[in-house]
Image (cartoon, helix red, strand yellow):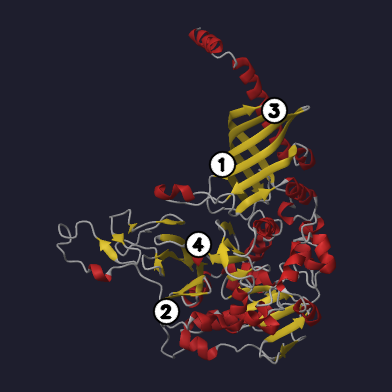
Amino acid sequence: MLDHDRRIGTTGLDEDASLIPDLSNGLIDRSIYTDPEIYRLELRRIFARAWNFMCHETQIPNAGDYFINYIGEDQVIAVRGDDGQVRVLLNTCRHRGNALCRAELGNTRTFVCSYHGWTYGLDGKLIGIPGKTDFYRDDVDQAKLGLVPAAKVDQYKGFCFATLDPAAPSLFDYLGEVGRIGIESMLDHGDVVALDGVQKNVIDCNWKIAVDNLFDWYHVKVSHNSASRVGFLNQRMMMPMTQMVMLGELGHAIGGPMITEEQQAKIDALSDEERAAIDRLPDAERAKVTPSERRPLRSTAAKATMGQVGVRATGHPNIFPNLWISTRGMQLSLRLPRGPGRTEIWWFTVMPKSFGDAQRRAAKKFLTHAFGPAGLLEQDDGENWSQSTAAGRGVVSGRHPHNLQMAQGQDEVLVHPSGQKRIETRVNEHAQRWTYTCWAEWMRARDWPELMATRSSSPTGRI
Amino acid sequence: MSQVVRLDQEATASPGLPERVLLQYEVEQFLYHEAALLDDRRFGEWLALIADDIHYWMPIRRTVTVENLHLEYAGPNGMAYFDDDRTDLGMRVQKLQSNSAWSENPPSRTRHLVSNVRILEVKGSEIALEAAIHLYRSRLNDKIDHWIGKRRDGLRRVEGGFQIFQRHIFLDQTVVLSTNFSSLF
């Protein structure tokens, strides 16, 4: 789908591209956090183009179950039809644009507009127009006025995504190896089920600051100092000195702690039963015997699904643009744009079906206390992000770029015989720089073919 | 004059009224005292009022249709904003008392308003009550949050007063329109 909203000048140059600063050297021009024109371009060139996470399939198991989500600022209904298929429909009546569905979730047989009563089926077909004969004199093309569907809907192992752009590559190709490792990191204990309840809150910050923070293991020791002091996090977790970064095409990345090859060799020597037994131990006892701090230890099967390098990555994956998968592989967070200076943070939680009650309770307890607006960690993030955004509005402050140059040019991309690439290093800002480099490529490209032709391939060599 | 008569009649008709009024007074005074401790940042003293078996819970609430009202709250097996025991609350208090809990340094200015207190049940030493709450938070120079909702508290009579063994908070908001919950309810 060509980006028609703005005319391309007679020279063939894209006027919009001139808005996009060069971000490749890690200096981030603050206009990208505050400029309303850049924000509108993001809605078109990033959100309306990308595959966006909708929900886990177990959130809408039955015909008529629906869940409301967003693609940029387009509100959509993810709904399961009578045929069992999940569809994603724009939540806007074809008559006067009213929102059909005012609830966040539920079960229904039809979507009835509260304005004039136009009625749509679960498949989006317009099945009723009040006064069709009396008022419209049967002169209305009912078949053409169904709810606008997403261009493509697909799922990767139960995680449903949608794109509004018919030219988008398949979800599988879009995710690429790095995106798929991100999702596989939630599945190493088998199929998962979504827990009821998505935490949602609003932060006055630009969505990208909330996104790039997920790779930031530099802030943990400072921002989350109080969580560590009260014993919620141990100091080693606060600033791990062994970090792995994986950079995927189109902007996907994983950054954070890693399991070293030596640790992995010890894990490999354990059966799944032995791994589970270690994970059942209380923290202090577990620390004495576990080869790796990450809990739960990944299963033997994970090596095949995540790859020999991927299985050692225990940092945070981001599926571009805005889906963060948390360290333990049990939560997904969307950073949904609500204007250049406002972001909704949503937390979805999934649990392996194989978890027993006690295991599930323990995991839920940790997750509830880490993230969400009351989370002992997340409480202290929001104001950093809103103040970082707000300062960009100052005339002179706005002229000084954010600096994401840590470890630039200091590391090497290593290529495993399997082909998987990674950087093994200390705390760094590689994944943040990569995210912004790719962001700029998305923003300069006028359509999918142009993006595919101009995007950077996953880096090799010195980085 | 007629009002006095009616009150008298009520008192005669409800033999337990003076006791109930006294209990209502005690409970309300306790809730006001507790609210003042939080507003005055006397968190340690507040924590002393929390029973060891406390369940402090704020479920996730959703906007749903009338037909789907049974889905309004994520249940006890679902996720929540708060789902704390005594140890968790202890951590929150310790965090609030540190100077590196950045969401509370500089500190928020809060006012806990408690009203519409209704004692629902008295069972031995335990009292179940419901109250309307309004927690006002002012942060930095220009951030204002209003959290209004219903609280279901369980109080236990102990030597010298009450302890709280249940606090379930039902917020009158679905998407939380705030940066965080760094205050205690």
Q: SS of the residue at dot 2?
A: loop
**Are the residues under marks 1 and 2 on the same chain?**
no
On the image, numbered disc 4 is attached to which residue?
A59
On the image, numbered disc 3 is attached to which residue?
B125
Disc on res. B149: 1
Residue drawn at x 69%, y 28% is B125
Determine whether label 4 and label 2 are within 8 Å by CB. no
**Are the residues under marks 4 and 1 on the same chain?**
no
Amino acid tagged 4: Gln
Determine whether label 3 and label 1 are within 8 Å by CB. no
> What distance separates the C-alpha of mark 4 from that of mark 3?
42 Å
Q: Is residue A362 above or below residue A407?
A: above
Amino acid tagged 1: Gly
Q: SS of the residue at dot 3?
A: loop
Among the two numbered marks 4 and 2 on one chain, the one whose residue lies closer to the N terminus: 2
How crowded pointer 3 is (Cα within 10 Å; few <14, some 14-19, many 20+) is rated as few
Determine whether label 1 and label 2 are within 8 Å by CB. no
The disc numbered 4 marks a residue on which chain?
A: A
Q: Is residue A229 left or right of residue A147?
A: right
Among the two numbered marks 3 and 1 on one chain, the one whose residue lies closer to the N terminus: 3
> What distance separates the C-alpha of mark 3 from that of mark 2?
71 Å
How crowded pointer 4 is (Cα within 10 Å; few <14, some 14-19, many 20+) is rated as some
On the image, numbered disc 2 is attached to which residue?
A6
The picture places residue B156, in percent across and down from the top left corner, at: 70, 32
**Are the residues under marks 4 and 2 on the same chain?**
yes
> Quadrant of the rendered structure where residue A102 is?
bottom left
The picture places residue A90, in percent across and down from the top left corner, at: 39, 66
